[in-house]
Image (cartoon, grey):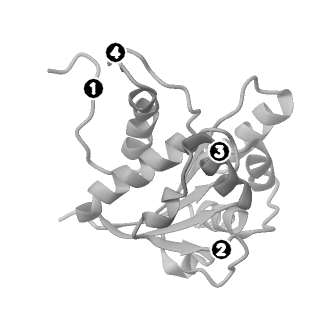
Amino acid sequence: MQKLKKIVVAITGASGAVYAKLLLDNLKTLQDQIDKVGVVMSDNAKEVWRYELGNEAYNSYNFDFYSKMDFNAPFASGSAKYDTMIIVPCSMGTLGRIAHGISNDLISRAADVILKERRKLITVVRDTPFSLIHLNNMKTVTEAGGIICPANPSFYSIPKTIEEVAQTVIDRVVDLAGLEKDSYRWKED
């Protein structure tokens, strides 16, 4: 039997709230593979969600939510044994703080914990173009064991809506997190 996952989802203020929404929706349907989901959102993430999606539906998910300064959250310590952290979307400011070990809020602290414990950190970076600073920060996080999964959708599944386009990214994130989900696979029937 597969061990149930303990997952941290961090949502930052980068554009791309649809990615966060779709990830939370997917995690809701994969509860049989998950022990716990802890969520932390930056203030900017809530603002971007309201602006881009026109609602506050992030309040409707039945996951454990923590404030961005709650260092008593279980995943602020390695002893809680969270397996995976997904930052979606991941702002370049957040990535930079992680790359340089600046744990000034729960998001950067949790990422620091995940990396030091040699667990899985997935950053869904969402910016374009990338500056040399961004690229160097991605390199640093990768060398520390993190996974950079840019929010670059694929189109070979012939998506028809914005959500279907964004789902191509989230399908990759779900795969990277080690969760099993039916999704489009290249050249498979």
Rate crowding at label 2 as few (under 14), some (14 to 19) or many (20 or more) other CA atoms within 10 Å: some
As displayed, is residue 37 above or below residue 158? below
Residue positioned most to the bottom: 72
Q: Nearer the viewer, residue 60 or 37?
A: 60
Give the image location of residue 87, x and y in percent.
59, 52
> From mark 3 to mark 4, how far is it between C-alphas?
27 Å
> Do the numbered discs 3 and 1 sit on residues whose CB atoms are within 8 Å?
no
Q: Earlier in the sequence, mark 3 or mark 1?
A: 3
Q: Nearer the viewer, mark 3 or mark 1?
A: 3
Rate crowding at label 3 as few (under 14), some (14 to 19) or many (20 or more) other CA atoms within 10 Å: few
Q: Earlier in the sequence, mark 2 or mark 4?
A: 2
At 82% from the left and 62% from the top, the residue drawn is 102
| Residue 65 appears in the picture as rendered | yes
Q: Earlier in the sequence, mark 1 or mark 2?
A: 2
* Quadrant where the N terminus is found in the figure: bottom left
Give the image location of residue 95, x and y in percent.
73, 47
Residue type, numbered disc 3? Tyr
> From mark 1 to mark 2, how far is it between C-alphas?
37 Å
Q: Which residue carries the number 1 mark?
A: 185
Q: Nearer the viewer, mark 3 or mark 2?
A: 3
Q: Nearer the viewer, residue 110 or 163?
A: 163
At 69% from the left and 46% from the top, the residue drawn is 141
Res. 67 mark? 2
Q: Which residue carries the number 4 mark?
A: 158
